[in-house]
């Protein structure tokens, strides 16, 4: 995993970056919760790896109505929705890590 330039370009073309900015506080809150979950339950109290946080975050994103609506409005093909949701999770985790002063 990891947010590549290609994935970032797909997100920008589909305006997921605008979705992020519109609800930045909510996405960062989700990421903070996912980070805590990953730290406590996956990494044994140690700093979790970004991919572990992404997996935890996907649980919340799977049920988020804003993201589902965005995917419907942007006409994201059904077969690509899971893949784009994962890209978006990687994007949110990267933004969260940047907000904590971590390097990407």
Image (cartoon, rainbow, N blue to C red):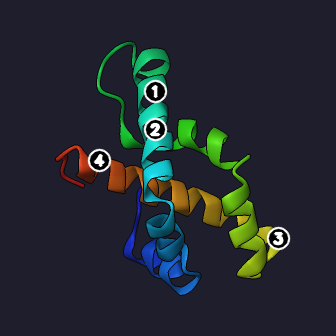
Q: Residue at x 43, y 52 (%)?
A: 25
Residue 43, x across and y down, in percent: 40, 20
Q: Residue at x 73, y 55 (%)?
A: 65
Label 2: which secondary element: helix
Residue occupied by mark 1: 38
Residue occupied by mark 4: 97
Q: Earlier in the sequence, mark 1 or mark 2?
A: 1
Measure how far apart labels 3 and 1 are at the Cα level: 29 Å
Q: Hey, which residue is sitting farthest top in the picture?
A: 44
Q: Can you say whether 75 is above or below 27 in the image?
A: below
Measure how far apart labels 1 and 2 are at the Cα level: 6 Å
Measure how far apart labels 2 and 4 are at the Cα level: 10 Å
Q: Can you say whether 92 is above or below 40 in the image?
A: below
Residue 53's disc number: 2
Labelled pair 3, 2 in contact (Cβ < 8 Å)? no
**In front of the other: label 2 or label 4?**
4
Q: Earlier in the sequence, mark 3 or mark 4?
A: 3
- Badge 1 crowding class, 10 Å Cα cut-off, few under 14, some 14 to 19, many 20 or more, is many
Label 3: which secondary element: helix
Quadrant in the rendering for residue 36? top left
Q: Residue at x 78, y 74 (%)?
A: 72
Q: Can you say whether 47 is above or below 71 in the image?
A: above
Residue occupied by mark 3: 78
Label 1: which secondary element: helix
Label 4: which secondary element: helix
Quadrant in the rendering for residue 56? top right
Q: Earlier in the sequence, mark 3 or mark 1?
A: 1
Measure how far apart labels 3 and 4 are at the Cα level: 29 Å
Q: Earlier in the sequence, mark 3 or mark 2?
A: 2
Residue 50, x across and y down, in percent: 38, 42
Labelled pair 1, 2 in contact (Cβ < 8 Å)? yes
Report whether 40 appears left or right of 64: left
């Amino acid at each position: 995993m990891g947010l590549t330039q290609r994935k970032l370009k797909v997100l920008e073309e589909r305006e997921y970056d605008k979705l992020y900015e519109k609800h930045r506080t909510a996405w960062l809150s989700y990421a903070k919760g996912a980070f805590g979950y990953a730290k406590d339950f996956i990494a044994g109290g140690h700093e979790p790896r970004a991919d572990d946080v992404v997996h935890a975050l996907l649980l919340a994103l799977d049920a988020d109505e804003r993201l589902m609506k965005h995917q419907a409005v942007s006409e994201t093909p059904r077969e690509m929705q899971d893949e784009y949701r994962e890209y978006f999770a990687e994007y949110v985790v990267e933004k969260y890590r940047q907000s904590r002063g971590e390097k990407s």
